[in-house]
Image (tube, rainbow, N blue to C red):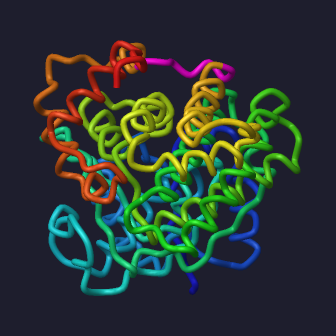
Amino acid sequence: MSSVLVVTDKGVRDAGLLEGIIKSISAADLNYEIYDEVEPNPSAETIHRGTDLLKEHKFEAVLAVGGGSSIDTAKGIAAMATNSGHIFDYEGVGKLTNSPLPIIAIPTTSGTGSEVTNSTVVTNKETHFKLGVLSPLLFPDLAILDPVLTLGLPQGITAATGMDALTHAIESYTSKTANPISQAFAMQAIKMISKNLTNCYFVGTDLESRKNMLEASLLAGAAFSQSRLGNVHAISHTFGGVFNIPHGIANAALLPFVMKFNLPACAEQYKEIAIALGRDVSGLSVMEAANEAIETVIELNRSMNIPLNIKELGVTLDVLPKLVEDSMRSGNVFVNPRLTKPADIQMIIEKAYEGDLTSF
């Protein structure tokens, strides 16, 4: 390759995280342009503007530097550079026909795992819906994990992205389509997050913990690329589309409520997760041990100042029918461990709104 489009957001650029990367690109005598218009819950318009820029300069590859939004945007640009029409035409699984341009991903957060996943999530601003484009062609060609790039993360982003990774691992581990390999990745991710996330949050500058969280995030991403996810993601994507709530914080706030709903369907797996999270479950029944996993998630949220209800995130119930309808459109509902109907999604949202975990 002789040229590359660098896809990022203004926060990453302003933080100086591109400096070493651009120096390296320049030293290799590559032509480049920086596209820094990525926003949280990136829209189709952002992807198509980036595609136009890429085609104008005839860039040969796409380099994503940032969190999941930047990597998802880069995937969308790389795909639309070689596929005709609109990105919405490719909603669903396996609809891309041509291989995207080469994609290189350098994550600056330890959360989405998008650097090793086969999907990109795009927001339709007209319908306020986040849709997924999934294809084996969307796996990045190269992922570079550098923990130094995560040292300056604010505490809030460290917490939200870390809990996003934990949600990926838990939902992947309990998915109906999980397999021994995806579960091995997911379980290792859970163990690593348990041992490193709070250290990243409270200390921040410990490079070993930052490295371990990046690796855990990657493992969780590799896991759910095989297994899909569950109801947390089905619902949280609607919150991103309707209320523009950052994905990680929505996942974190929803996770205890979905786990409580799923408890009857995967108690044994939750017991295993509780042990991986460091709980001593000796002498407890399976159900009691499973509840320890939920309590640990609640304690993690509380310790990192993540709201224990979704009302504090800005969710309102005046659009509840849309939230339910859009959640049920997600393929994640159908691999959730417990059979889920629209009434169940409504109940989970209502319970999460009030912060009520007592009456599932």
Q: Is residue 96 left or right of residue 271?
A: left
Q: Is residue 72 left or right of residue 221?
A: left
Taken as a whole, is the magenta stretch helix, strand or loop? loop
Quarter of the image where one finds residue 326: top left
Q: Identify the residue shown where x is 35% and y is 65%.
A: 76
Q: Is residue 305 magenta?
A: yes
| Residue 255 in sight in this render | yes
Q: Is residue 38 magenta?
A: no
Which quarter of the figure is the N terminus placed in? bottom right
Q: Nearer the viewer, residue 347 or 11?
A: 347
Magenta range = 303-309
Q: Identify the residue shown where x is 27% and y is 52%.
A: 333
Quarter of the image where one finds residue 175: bottom left
Q: Nearer the viewer, residue 271 or 249?
A: 271
Q: Identify the residue shown where x is 70% and y is 60%.
A: 188
What x and y, as percent, mark residue 344? 22, 35
Q: Nearer the viewer, residue 240 or 259?
A: 259
What x and y, as percent, mark residue 115? 56, 65
Q: Nearer the viewer, residue 196 or 186?
A: 186
| Residue 44 in sight in this render | no
Looking at the image, residue 123 lies above or below residue 243: below
What x and y, as percent, mark residue 45? 25, 51
The image shows a total of numbered marks equal to: 0
Which quarter of the figure is the C terminus placed in? top left
Looking at the image, residue 296 lies above or below residue 179: above
